[in-house]
Image (cartoon, rainbow, N blue to C red):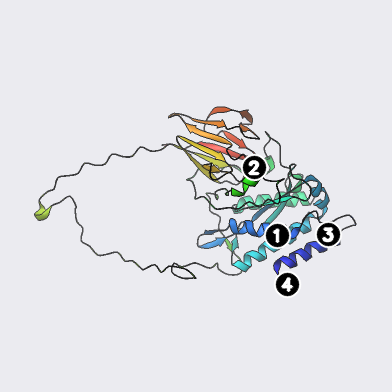
Amino acid sequence: MSFLSDFESRIGAVFGAAPQGYTEPFSFKKLAKRAAREMENETYEIDGVDTAPALYTVLVSATDDSLMRPLYEQITYETSAFVTAQAQKKGYAFVGSPLVRFMVDPSLKSGKFAVFAENVDEGTLARLREEERAFLAGSSSAGGAAAQVHPRGKRRRAAAAPSPAPASAPTPEPETPAADGLDVMPLEAVDLVPLVPSTSTPRPVPLGGPAPVVIPGEGPGAVPVPQTQRRSVPLVDPRRGVGDVAATPEPAPEPEPQVATCLLIDRQSGRTYTASAPSTIVGRERSQAGVVLRDPNVSRRHAELSFDGRDWHIADLGSTNGTLVNDVDVRECVLRDGDLITLGLTNLEFRENPR
C-alpha cells in the first residue's frame, strides 16, 4: 500500500471511530498531495543537506473547523506522519519533527482549504509547537484552529516572532501555491513565489541517512564539467612595458554610485527582503513585484517603496486590504527605522540599510 493510500485509510479510521455526524469535510487525499507538493517547493539544500520545511499550516473554513476540532490531535498526527514518510523516502531532513496546524480563514467556504509549508528555524518551530500543544490540551486559545485569520488592521499577535537582526537578502525561491479552490485564492495567485528563507540558517536533522549530493557531470542529462587547476604563472605587472620601461599608467576607474536599499523583516518567520531605490513594488505576483509575499490577503500590486534621496516612503497601490504602518491605515507616508508595516496578514519590520 502506498503512503497516500495508507494515509487516506488512517484518516478514514479517525472519522469512522468518531461519534455519528463526524464526516470528512473535504478530501484528505487532496490535502496530502498539496502538502507533498509544498514540501517539494520549499525544500532547499542547507549545509549540503536537502532540508524540507517542518511547518505546515492548513487553512479551513469556520464550519469545517468546528466539525474537526475534537479530532485535530489525531488528524495532525497522521498528517505529520505522512509528511515525515514522504521526506524519508526522498532522503530529506528536517530541523525538527514536522508540525501541522489548522487555522480558520473566514473567507473560505466549507469543503475548501489551502496548505502552506515554511522552512522556519528550530527555535520558532519549538515555540509554535508549544502553542499547538496548549491549544489541543484546551489550556490556551492561542494557535491551532482557534487562531483565525484576522480582518484588516489586526495583527496575529500569537504568531509573531521576536524581531531578528537585519541581514543581507537571501536568494529568492520558486514556489507553487496550494489553494484548493477559488474561495481561497484567485487564479492569478497561481504565479506566486515563496517567501525568502530565514537569514538564520537552521541546522538540519537528517532522517534515515544522509541526503543525496548531486555532483556535476553525474546523473541523467548532466553535462560533464572538466576539472580546472590554477596555472603556475609568474606575477606580472601589466602596467610595466618590455625591458622594465614604465608604461603610461591608466587612470583609476571612478567608483560606481551605491544604490540605496532597505530591509523588510517578516516578524513571524524572520525572513528578510531587500528593496532597492528608486522604487520597489511589494505584492504577491512575481511578474509585477520586486518583493513577493506569499500571502493570499496581499494584492498582486499591494504597495510601493520609494526613495527620494533622503527618506524612504511607502504608498498603497489601491490594495484590497490596505496598508498599515504601526497599526495605522495609510495611503502614503515616510518610513522610519523600526516601523511596522502590515500587508494582509504579514507584518514586516522596516530597517534602513546604511550606505
Q: Nearer the viewer, mark 2 or mark 1?
A: 1
Q: Residue at x 83, y 51 (%)?
A: 67
Nearer the observer, disc 4 or disc 3? 4
Q: Are marks 2 and 4 in contact (CB under 8 Å)?
A: no
Closer to the chain start, of discs 4 and 3, is 4
The local secondary structure at tag 4 comes to loop
The correct choice, above or below, for 211 with respect to 121 in the image is below
Residues at badges 3 and 1 in contact (C-beta under 8 Å)? no
Residue type, numbered disc 2? Ala
The amino acid pointed to by label 1 is Ala
Between marks 4 and 3, how big is the CA–CA gap?
20 Å
Look at the image and tell me in which quarter the C terminus lies.
Answer: top left
Toward the viewer: 317 or 326?
317
Query: Distance of mark 2 from mark 1, alpha carbons?
Result: 27 Å
Label 4, on which residue? 1
What residue sits right under mark 2 in the picture?
160
User: Which comes before the other along the chain, label 2 or label 3?
Assistant: 3
Q: Earlier in the sequence, mark 2 or mark 1?
A: 1
Q: Position of residue 74 (x, y in %)?
A: 78, 59
| Image x and y of residue 110, in percent | 79, 48
- The answer to whether the residues at label 1 and label 4 have Cβ atoms under 8 Å apart is no
Dot 3 amino acid type = Phe
Choose top left, top right, bottom left or bottom right for residue 35: bottom right
Task: Point out residue 44 in the picture as x, y percentages from the top left corner.
Answer: 54, 58
At label 1, counting other C-alpha atoms closer than 10 Å, the crowd grade (few under 14, some 14-19, many 20 or more) is: many
Residue identified by numbered label 3? 15
- The residue labelled by disc 1 is 32
| Residue 294 coordinates in the image, percent (x, y) | 61, 46
Mark 2 vs mark 3, CA separation in Å: 33 Å
Residue 179 in view (yes/no): yes
Image height of 273 relative to 279, above or below: below
Classify residue 139 as left or right of residue 207: right
